[in-house]
Image: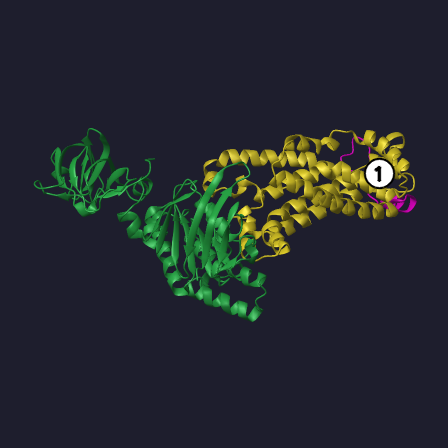
Amino acid sequence: MVSLADSPTATAPKKRLRTGGTLNRILMVLLLTVVTIWLVVPFTMAVLWSLVDPETGWNYPDLLPPSLTVLRWVEVWTTTALPQAIANSYMLAPTVAVVTLLLASPTAYCFARYDFPGKGLAQVATLLPLVVPGFVLAIFFSSLIFSLGIYSRFLSILMAHCVLFLPYAIRIMTVSFGQVRQDLIDAARDLGASPFAVFRAAYMPALLPGILASLIIVFIQSIEEFAIAFIVGAPNFTTIPSILYSYLGYNFIRPNAAVVSLILVVPNVLLMLGLERLLKSANPAQMGGKG
Amino acid sequence: MTALRSIDVSKVFEDGFTALSGINLSVEPGEFVTLLGPSGCGKTTLLKIFAGFYAPTTGRIEQNGADVTNAPPEKRDTAMCFQSYALFPHLSVAENVEFGPKQNKVPKDDRVKRVNELLRQVDLEANRDKLPNKLSGGQQQRVALTRALAMRPSVVLFDEPLSNLDAKLREQVRREIRSLQREFGFTAIYVTHDQSEALAMSDRVVVMNGGKVEQIGDPEEVYQRPETAFVADFIGSANLLPFERVDDHTVDTPLGRFTVDDPPVADSRFLCWRPEAADYGVSEGENVVASDISERAYQGAYTDVHIAVPGAPDQRLHWPGSASSMSDRVTFRLPPDRIRFVRGELG
């Protein structure tokens, strides 16, 4: 999620805003409408559904549930492996995010800062994991894992997730490494900086937004991923999506599914908002000011 | 002892491009030397070899008598002022200036004292906590120079530091750099393609073309006594004429017969005179030329007059009066001591 303040149009001179006032207002209203329909309404529905009282239900033509209760929350929490699944998911996703970032960075560095024969082909090749359907990958990956003799479920899912989400991290970090200014690297070296100091002074400020973006995106992808987590992990290693999917399909229980979705989504949203803040305060040089 | 010296330095890049060949240059301590030439002449490459960013393909670099050919930039006693300023955008002015001493493990007290003193000297105290992007171009340039000076380098390398400033500011910053150089006494090597910058600032000018040194001399020397057609043409404007030698002090040219003080030598190719060298209002005696005017352009302080002579295209002179006071013909005299001979090709 990129905030409006970071986009080039928002930092453009105020004059343009004034001249295109009407158009801007129309676009703004349109954007708010779309955001409401796509995000606010489903989210509110999820909250309401998770609070529906099983005694009365929520049927047509009631606009709102006739009575609300936290019974569903208690039920899901006490009768399923949800607490363990939360622990698993929140251990897995940050690890995946960090490992993926570390694996992606050298590749991204080469893509951004070197020219070599076959670079275009290599860049396309790194995107391949995106086009393979998750379940296909999961089925063959699980057999591969077992023939390799790796029995740790955590490690297996970690490896699979890293492969699956590398394309995102590589793309983001390639852009970031491309923004590192050569003159700053030269200046830092010229001023006697050690390789580590050069990294801190010349690379880090340009990389930081990319690092955070890559961490967030991979974290969210990993925490929401179902196919691999289910096929490789089940039944010993449960993640939040495994529980969510158990309420879908044949024994469909919408209120319980709503509870699990909220547990899955709310921390993600909070995390994203928090990091967004951090990103801004960490990088004042990126915002505004004349060149 | 020379501050910095290149011995037979050449540089061939990986793609086969020869950027420099056979560069011999000695810079004395405290000297302000300018590398002047058109883009692609190798001047920036030579500067980067002095800084340590490039290793020369052949040849050596000596600093204070010690061989530093293979020393990386972080180990050299040189500091560079970049064309783009290259200030760290996330660090304040004071932090930028402190960066170098910090990397070199200067104790905190000394460091702070040094930074404060420098910021006062260059009049940046009021801006010490600002980020670079809140400063004007001229101020950023001054921060860049201050940051270089905080290293107390014996040599400061300037890579076209004024090219991003507008004309008025350029002249002001140029004077600032020169006065700081005198005040701190550092050796300066200054790369530029602007001949007026080179003439105004330098103790010595190194004119470069096509990866070679064309001429080394003080500003007056390279302007008044150019050795090659390239130098004559690149610095200021020059009129070049083919000539035939009559005797040591007489030559024939398309403009007529001229008496000269300095005789042409074996490899002299052109007679060279400056547009402002002509004496006006003299119509009799030796070296007098009378010609039709083909074109005139009013320039304020003078009028740029082109004269049409068969066999000598593009001859121009600076008429000191206004354009309206001129007739269609011009008569002038070339003093024998203002006529030079140059070698080399044109263009």
Q: Is residue A66 visible?
A: no
Q: Which chain is green?
A: B
What is the residue that sits farthest to the left in this orientation? B284
Magenta stretch, overall SS: loop
As rendered, which of A251 and A160 lies closer to the eye?
Answer: A160
**Left or right relative to A206: residue A102:** right
As rendered, which of A180 and A134 lies closer to the eye?
Answer: A180
- Give the vertical position of B118 relative to A85 (above or below): below
- Percent position (x, y) of residue B140? 45, 54
Q: Mark 1 falls on what kind of element?
A: helix
What is the residue that sits farthest to the bottom in this orientation? B109
Which contiguous range is marked in magenta? A58-82
- Percent position (x, y) of residue A54? 88, 39
Q: Colour of chain A?
A: yellow
As rendered, which of B144 and B249 lies closer to the eye?
Answer: B249
Query: What residue is at 54 percent from the left and 42 percent from the top?
Result: A10
As rendered, which of B5 and B54 lies closer to the eye?
Answer: B5
- Percent position (x, y) of residue B259? 16, 42
Quadrant in the picture for the N terminus of chain B: bottom left
Indicate the quadrant where residue A149 lies.
top right
Indicate the quadrant where residue B315 lies.
top left
Judge the density around disc 1: few (<14), some (14-19), many (≥20) Cα neighbours within 10 Å.
Answer: many
Residue indicated by mark 1:
A229
Query: What residue is at 78 percent from the left and 47 percent from the top?
Result: A95
Disc 1 marks a residue whose amino acid type is Ala
Residue A69 on the magenta segment:
yes
The chain letter for the residue carrying disc 1 is A
- Percent position (x, y) of residue A84? 88, 47
